[in-house]
Amino acid sequence: MHSKQEHKLKVFWLQGLTCNGNAHSFLNLDYLGELLEKTEFLQHPLLPSKYALSEMAECKTGCDVLIFEGAYDPSLKRAGVFVDKILRHYAKNAKYIIAVGTCASFGGIFKATSPQTNSGILFNEAEKNGPLQEYNAKIINLSGCPVHPEWLGFTLNMIIDRRKIVLDEEHRPQELYSSLVHHGCTRNEYFEWKVDANHFGEKEGCLFYKQGCRAPMTHGSCNTILWNGVNSKTRSGTPCFGCTESDFPRTNLFETKTNMSIPADAPVGVPKRAYLTVTGIAKTFHIKRLEEPLIDYKNNT
Amino acid sequence: MARTTKEERKNGIISAALELFSENGFYITTIPDIAKKVGMSVGNFYNYFSSKDILAKELIMYISEYLGKNIRAINESDISTQEKIEKIVSMYFDTAKERPEMIEYFLRVYLSNREVFKDGCEGMICVSPFITEMMIFFEKGVASGELHDQDFFSAFGLFMGYLGGMVFLYGEKILPEPLDDYKQSISENIYNALKTRT
């Protein structure tokens, strides 16, 4: 009879070019303790690990799940060994390869600095021509800058439970990325009636027209699976930057690109003509409730 | 002789009402006047439109849809923004010549009797098809790099204010030359005012 220890999922967290953001984000998973009882990190940059990185870099063992964080750079070394070599060795035998964060998924920030050499492991922005093509079938992209800890926790639990993970065209789990960040946004009523927020941090107003919010065209569940269980960018008055998409990072994150005051991009799936018609009509309504502060601090102190 | 359909009768009322409203104004024109012009009883008229105000709103929506449909065809054609401007100017002036009551109604009734349109036609509601197509025209013009980026209404006012002004002068018989003679220079002026600045 096997011991419980032997059934633990063996995970190797390897870093490419990264800011460590995803590794840190993962530490905020509220059920991290329970998850760690079911997994064994052979190596993780922050968590207690069975092996040192230098031991893993010898490429003498294997893992069930290879997690890759950061952009792929063919010239990068870890523990004196090319990351490319380590990545390919563990990718070959792993049951799943998870690209955590937008850099590992699509290239992200580090792709932007060096577009000629850096990419994600399977995708290079929206093009599927990254270095791990031969392992296409077992790669899961968990984009996000950083990845939401719950999204990684969910995916690892699905693997542990041997459940099928349905992916979208960009290899992201549909359970996590089928909806838009717009869904669940507490400002949707302002979006519908075209009442804009004029300053960051306000409780009132839509951030789409003036603040560069990408929530209506960004796939992710930030507003339904809240950060730390309590908040999201849009809820706190910061626009969604579209960090889960392959075109992240865009320039001018706090600006909405417009042509003649008309947003260059319409929400996903909405024809621009129809969108402009609906918008024009919605703007004619002046709903007093939506144009006033939700809380009148000045007269209540 | 084939019986006229309800839709045809409705269109007959719209044409007659447009002519009377644009010639005589909204308040002087009565429902009996309109019914008489289309050759139907006042009672039957109410089967089509339940009030003069409702008719007035239907008319502006009818004009907006007519203009919107024509501009949409121009927007969807594979030509430069400059050529689109020429076609929009041409279409607008042709409408002013062939169906002057449509443009007259817009200028003399819709813009002058706002109180009639305040409930149910607020803002862009009744002119949405037309405004939407102008938005599409401007947005595509900027996206293609042909027009310079600016506030929509600054550009819209320049374009439509100019055309409306010329048709007004034409209607008042002030223009010394036929309206067609102005199409080219007006198109050039609009394009020069809106084009990308280098």
Image: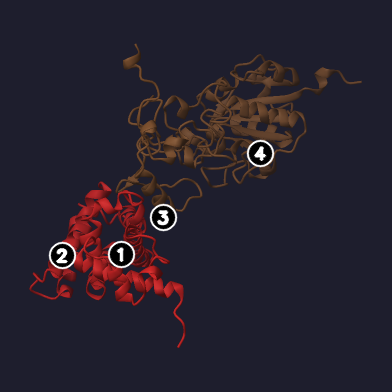
Chain colours: A brown, B red
Q: Chain of mark 2?
A: B
Rendered image quadrant of residue A80: top right
Distance, label 3 to label 4, CA atoms, is: 38 Å
Of labels 1 and 2, earlier in sequence is 1
Q: Position of residue A174 (x, y in %)?
A: 63, 40
Circle nearer the viewer, 1 or 2 = 2
Label 2 crowd bin: few (<14), some (14–19), many (20+), radius 10 Å: some
Per the image, the residue denoted by label 2 is: B168
1 and 2 marks on the same chain = yes
Rendered image quadrant of residue A249: top left
Identify the residue at image location x=26%, y=46%.
B151
Per the image, the residue denoted by label 3 is: A273
Dot 1 amino acid type? Ser
Circle nearer the viewer, 4 or 1 = 1
Distance, label 4 to label 1, CA atoms, is: 45 Å
Who is closer to the viewer here, A134 or B136?
A: B136
4 and 1 marks on the same chain = no
Distance, label 2 to label 3, CA atoms, is: 30 Å
Q: Is residue A271 above or below residue A130?
A: below
Q: Is residue A263 left or right of residue B116?
A: right
Per the image, the residue denoted by label 1 is: B80
The circle on residue A139 is: 4
Distance, label 4 to label 2, CA atoms, is: 67 Å
Mark 1 falls on what kind of element? loop
Dot 4 amino acid type? Ile
Q: Position of residue A293 (x, y in %)?
A: 36, 25
